[in-house]
Image: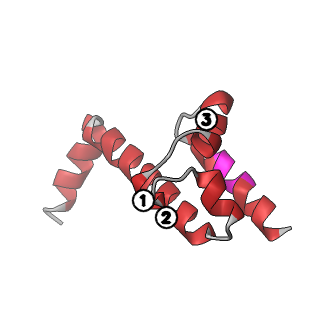
């Protein structure tokens, strides 16, 4: 089933940004989000609102990536050097 495969992909992404298995379960089933109208991702997903959950994950990944960039002097140096190209 498509939705199960997509949910598995989300779990993998959350794991790659540092969520433990327990944190992923909590995120799906217990953490409510303003972006989801105060509901959990599971509640939204089961209503078929897959894109809303996927957008929330994209925001999480973007935020995580941005915070890693901000703390990585090598990447910051490369970005600065690329301005001079």
Image location of residue 23, percent across then percent down: 59, 32
* Closer to the camera in the image, 64 or 51: 51
Helix, strand or loop at label 3? It is helix
* Closer to the camera in the image, 83 or 11: 11
Question: Which residues are the magenta region?
Answer: 8-12
Helix, strand or loop at label 2? It is helix
Among the two numbered marks 3 and 1 on one chain, the one whose residue lies closer to the N terminus: 3
Mark 2 lies on residue: 55
Q: Residue furthest front?
A: 38
Q: Residue at x 36, y 49 (%)?
A: 63
Q: Mark on residue 26?
A: 3
Q: Residue at x 25, y 36 (%)?
A: 73
Image location of residue 74, percent across then percent down: 29, 39
Image location of residue 48, percent across then percent down: 68, 70
Quadrant where the C terminus sits is: bottom left
Helix, strand or loop at label 1? It is helix
Secondary structure character of the magenta stretch overall = helix
Q: Residue at x 23, y 53 (%)?
A: 79
Among the two numbered marks 3 and 2 on one chain, the one whose residue lies closer to the N terminus: 3
Q: How are the colours assigned in the image?
A: secondary structure
Quick one: label 2, few (<14), some, or many (20+) residues within 10 Å?
few
């Amino acid at each position: 089933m498509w939705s199960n495969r997509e949910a598995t992909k989300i779990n993998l992404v959350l794991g790659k940004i540092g969520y433990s298995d327990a944190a992923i379960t909590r995120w799906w089933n217990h953490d409510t989000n303003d972006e989801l109208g105060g509901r959990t991702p599971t509640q939204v997903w089961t209503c078929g609102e897959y894109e809303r959950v996927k957008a929330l994950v994209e925001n999480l990944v973007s935020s995580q990536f941005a915070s890693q960039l901000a703390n990585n002097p090598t990447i910051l140096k490369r970005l600065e050097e690329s301005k001079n190209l």
